[in-house]
Amino acid sequence: MRKIILTGLAWALAATAPAWAAPDAAEQAQFDSFVVASGASNGAARACGASEPDLAQHQANARKNLLQYAQEYEFSAKGYDGLYQQGLAEGKTMMDEMKRSGVDGCRGVLGSFQNERVMGYEEMKGALAEVSDGLPGERAR
């Protein structure tokens, strides 16, 4: 289920990447969308009542993993904090809209969130490769 939530957020956000961009710019935009998606996961979990210690652990773990990913694949992470904050707001808004429409997505959100907050780097990297058809610089299989 966590991959479904992460996948959905990543695909929705990656779709906003400019189609005309060079491959390296498109990959940077995709990395940025992963940061936003991570913030959205945290914001959605906050809207669903996740505890402050769990929210802090998720945020710290996501930061550690995504900054390692940025370093490994030479992405710029200078906009990380702003993108993460954008995601926090988007996740909260998404959950508020779901609640208003009578849909309770909190069970799925919180399940994914709990997995993500303790996810190791290699597992995160594998999930990102799955939603983006490979790692940066690889051809889709």
Image (spheres, helix red, strand yellow):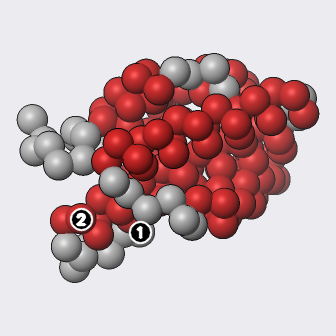
Q: If you read the primary sequence from the N terminus, does the residue marked by circle 1 or circle 2 appear first?
A: 1
Residue that numbered label 2 is attached to: 24
Circles 1 and 2: CB atoms closer than 8 Å = no
Quadrant (top left/top right/bottom left/bottom right) for the C terminus: top left
Mark 1–mark 2 Cα distance, whole angstroms, equals: 15 Å
> Residue 2: x, y in percent?
54, 26
Residue 34 visible at all: yes
Label 1 sits on a secondary structure element that is loop
Residue 90 or residue 117, whichever sits in front: 117
**Total labels drawn:** 2
In this view, the residue in front, 38 or 47, is 38
Left or right position of 66 against 95: left
Q: Provide residue 89's location: percent of width, then percent of height.
A: 74, 60
Residue at image location 81% in from the left, 27% down from the top = 54
Instruction: Please tell me whether residue 89 is drawn above or below residue 137 in the rendered image.
Output: below
Q: Residue at x 66, y 26 (%)?
A: 117
Query: The residue under label 1 is which amino acid type?
Result: Thr
Crowding at mark 2 (Cα within 10 Å: few <14, some 14-19, many 20+) = few
Say whether residue 95 is visible. Answer: no
- Element class at badge 2: helix
x and y, in percent, of residue 140 in the image: 13, 42
Q: Position of residue 36 (x, y in %)?
A: 57, 56
Q: What residue lies at 38% left-to-right and 64% top-to-bottom?
A: 29
Name the quadrant containing residue 24: bottom left
Q: Residue at x 87, y 28 (%)?
A: 53
The amino acid type found where label 2 is placed reads Asp
Above-or-below relation of 115 to 103? above
Q: Nearer the viewer, mark 1 or mark 2?
A: 2
Give me the disc on residue 45. Answer: none
Please identify the quarter of the rendering in which residue 105 is found.
top right
Query: Which residue lies under the disc numbered 1?
Result: 16
